[in-house]
Image: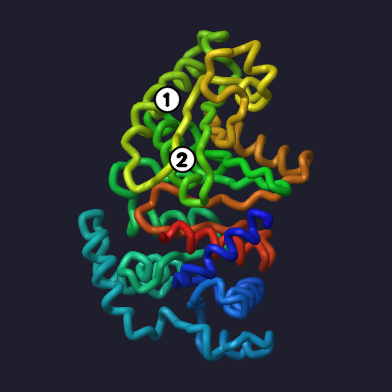
Amino acid sequence: MSFLEKILYQASQRQKTIVLAEGSDKRVLEAAKILTDKKIARIIVLGETDQVYRDLKALGAKTDEIRVIDPKTSDEHQRYAQCLYEIRKSKGLTMEDAEKLVEDNIYFGTLMVKNGDADGLVGGAIHASADMIRPALQIIRPAEGFKTISSVFFMCRGEEIYLFADCGLVEYPTTAQLSDIAVSTAITAMQFGIEPKIAMLSYSTKGSAKSEGAMKVAMAAERTREKVGHLFGYGGKVIVDGELQFDAAFVPEVAALKCPDSPLKGRANVFIFPNLEAGNICYKAVQRLGNFEAYGPILQGLARPVNDLSRGCVPEDIVGTAAITALQAQ
């Protein structure tokens, strides 16, 4: 089974409730139909109720199995507005402002997840990433023990699966943030049945360069080693090493020469990049030159799952992201 086939199957076994926030987009409705037909998740679509149902019927979707909610007319509008007000009043949000924000599909969907009325939220087909992530940071907030929200890409080719982070969110991570990103990515790997072998990447391998940037990665690796020994609720073993160049992390023959004592032995499957620029360039290069499928950016470090789509996504991308979101909601 491919990575996508595996996660679709695993999600179908859990039957989580996933909110698709953008019911005005045909791609989203096509994804809702697929997710429902294949019984991958229970689906809620946000949008103007009559129009969304008409569009779903035109696609041949099982409208009796898809719930459609209009945030502007929902019975939960006032309850969610009160919830948002309580969360944000210390930041100067008024009740009037909260009532207006709840009419926004992304805020409404995020509040559904916050209140346990849904297990996860997927959006971004027609919204900018900032508009997806801002409500999540304001409302869901980081999981216990984390201060950093980051993103990860699953890079897949046949049976090969690698995790790249952070390629979409934290631009210039500090030592502490790099460590948080590594720990979050280890947890994400474990959630998907992958035993994490983490390489903290640099242009330097084990002190071959003495720059501040290389030393920061080495310090983040040490900090991560201390943290992963305290991951509760997840099985498996976590291996962490750094700072490493990519070839030393990935090619056993190179590792034997450059870092013979590395516990990774050149077999890393989780790659933590020193900054967003390096990570974003690398995942796109691997995707295009290596013919890898890239699933992401998947947000991690949140207390409950909210995930962002590329605005160039196709229905199958939305289906895959919804299934990943369902597994994150375990």
Q: Under tag 1, what secondary structure?
A: helix
Q: According to the image, label 2 marks what residue? A: 186
Q: Which of labels 2 and 1 is toward the front? A: 2
The image position of residue 112, as x and y in percent, is 37, 71
Seen at 33% across and 49% down, the residue is 143
Nearer the observer, 273 or 310: 273
Please, is residue 271 above or below residue 288 in the view?
Answer: above
- Residue position marked by numbered label 1 in the rendering: 220
Q: Amino acid at mark 1?
A: Ala
Location of residue 50 (image quadrant): bottom right
Name the secondary structure under disc 2.
helix
**Amino acid on which disc 2 is placed:** Ala
Can residue 123 be seen here? The reply is no
Residue at left 62%, top 24%? Answer: 266
Q: Nearer the viewer, residue 37 or 120?
A: 37
In the displayed structure, does residue 193 sit left or right of residue 4? left
Crowdedness near tag 1: few (<14), some (14–19) or many (≥20) residues, C-alpha within 10 Å: many
